[in-house]
Amino acid sequence: QASNGCHNGESASTSNDLQNGTCSFEENVEINGDVHKTISTKIRSQTDQDIIRLIGQHLRGLGLNRTAEQLMKESGCRLDHPSAAKFQAHVMDGDWPKAETDLGDLKQLLETQHSLVEMKFLLLEQKYLEYLEDGHVLEALQCLRHELTPLRFNTNRVHELSSYMMCSTGEELRRMSHWDGKGVHSRQKLMEKLQAFLPPSVMLPPRRLQTLLNQAVELQKDRCPYHNSKSDSNLDNISLLIDHTCTKEQFPCETVQVLKDHCDEVWFCRFSNDGKKLATGSKDTTVSIWDVNPDTLELTHRRTFEGHPGGVSFLAWSPDDTYLIACGPDDSSDLWVWNIATGGLRIKMNHSPEDSLTTCAWNKDGKRFVCGGTRGQFYQCDLDGNVLDSWEGVRVQCLWCRKDGKTVLAADTHHRIRGYNFEDLTDFNILQEGHSVMSFTCDDSGRLALLNVATQGVHLWDIEDRVLVRKFQGVTQGYYTIHSCFGGVNQVFIASGSEDNKVYIWHIKREMPIAVLLGHTRTVNCVSWNPTYPSMLASASDDGTVRIWGPAERYRSNKGQSISISNTNV
């Protein structure tokens, strides 16, 4: 069967005059001493020629070979260079001697000689594996010794291939080599690898039209300021006839629930890592735990932890959500570790009455945490409250543990964020602000840091490159401690409370807010975006309430995961 542009038995050698065999005007071209007449084209625009080739390839992928053939014939275009089409046909047929000969014809179209060697290696690798699966051990050994090895390419892989000689069955071979076995599927995968070495004008990359359409859809989603649903790479569920658009109503901009259980200012709120619970801390000396209903995304009260003199200004969930640490305000020397499941107090830590333990962060192992405050305390502790390490003289405003398990980032009273390595006891500068860093948090990658800076607002830093990326506009930030957060699908949104009683939301690529949420009547101290249900946002305020934000009612579904309508076109 003809494949990818080798139609009616026609073939031609490689020639620069055919510019890789796409389309050409009618002319005589001398090839190997013979005169061949090229196809007369009716399509002169290069863009139109490319589109025809893309459509032709897609039609072939659908099995509409006659239609593709007619399109190529009527347009005067060739889908692929004749030598490339012949090469593909021989690969798919498993005719390895002819496929190797075809490589010689394609040699002048490759950018480097090294590409030719690598392509030949891939061919011979498939040939070798097929010999083994068919039980032709001597032929496989011949291929390994006298064809693959002399190439002097990827010797580690050659040694690995040689080990497959010990396989007693085809099933064992396929399992050890992670290979699909002899047939169309493995040869198609091989062909896709080989196509990567050929210029697209010679042979189109696999499924090129579908790739371009996927890129176009993803670009539209990326440019949509309110897109907050998990992307589906399958185009079957997307209309290509209209542009992708999300409305603001699909975004968490409406109050869906107001929690009024606290009887004083609410200073902090934080969803658990699995998104199934919310913890809130208040000046009323209590911590409340709420369960998230995954169907309605409404919260129900689970339990209350009492007995935190001075109130609770910071909370931190352990990585597995088993424990919750509660810290008090500036004059608090106590720290509480609560067991969420049992409701019991694991430990109340008070290292010294002179301490000020106002912030903390969990190590990724869930067995250690760091804590500190502005009086110069900075400890690493275990779950029993034992101080494992300490760093003297560091006045800590906020803490974050990196995923390497040994480095802690700390915002100090000198307007800096510094890194502290508890293993080798080294420290280093990361960034310097001009005003006090009241709080900060990092995204899941650990590369981006979000800072609330006194009198300046919310700043986004790349802490790998150590550059200020963006200053978000609109928020009112004085000298109160306000906690902002990353959120939404892929954490492309930023949310922050404000001293003007509002919640501000930005897209991570835009300085101006895309939403301003009204409802609180006093300063909004903290916001938390649900990490599992991206259309759920919580905010805690001095007005004594916690507000839960979600999409407009008509966009709320029965399941929280899809509350933000995926791929909706409006």
Image (tube, helix red, strand yellow):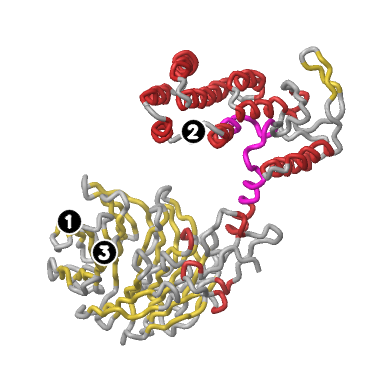
The magenta stretch spans residue 211: yes
State the quadrant of the C terminus: bottom right
User: In the image, what residue type sits under mark 2?
Assistant: Gly
Choose between 3 and 501: the one closer to the eye: 3
Crowding near pointer 3: few (<14 within 10 Å), some, many (20+)?
many
User: Which tag, 3 or 2, sits closer to the chain's start?
Assistant: 2
Q: Mark 1 = which residue?
A: 390
State the quadrant of the N terminus: top right
* Camera sees residue 471: no
Q: What's the residue at 24%, 71% (across, down)?
A: 341
Q: Name the spot of residue 423 as percent of width and height, x first.
A: 21, 47
User: Which tag, 1 or 3, sits closer to the chain's start?
Assistant: 3
User: In the image, what residue type sits under mark 3?
Assistant: Cys
Mark 3 falls on what kind of element? strand
Q: Mark 2 = which residue?
A: 181
Q: Nearer the viewer, mark 1 or mark 2?
A: 2
Q: Mark 3 = which residue?
A: 360
Corner quadrant of residue 435 = bottom left
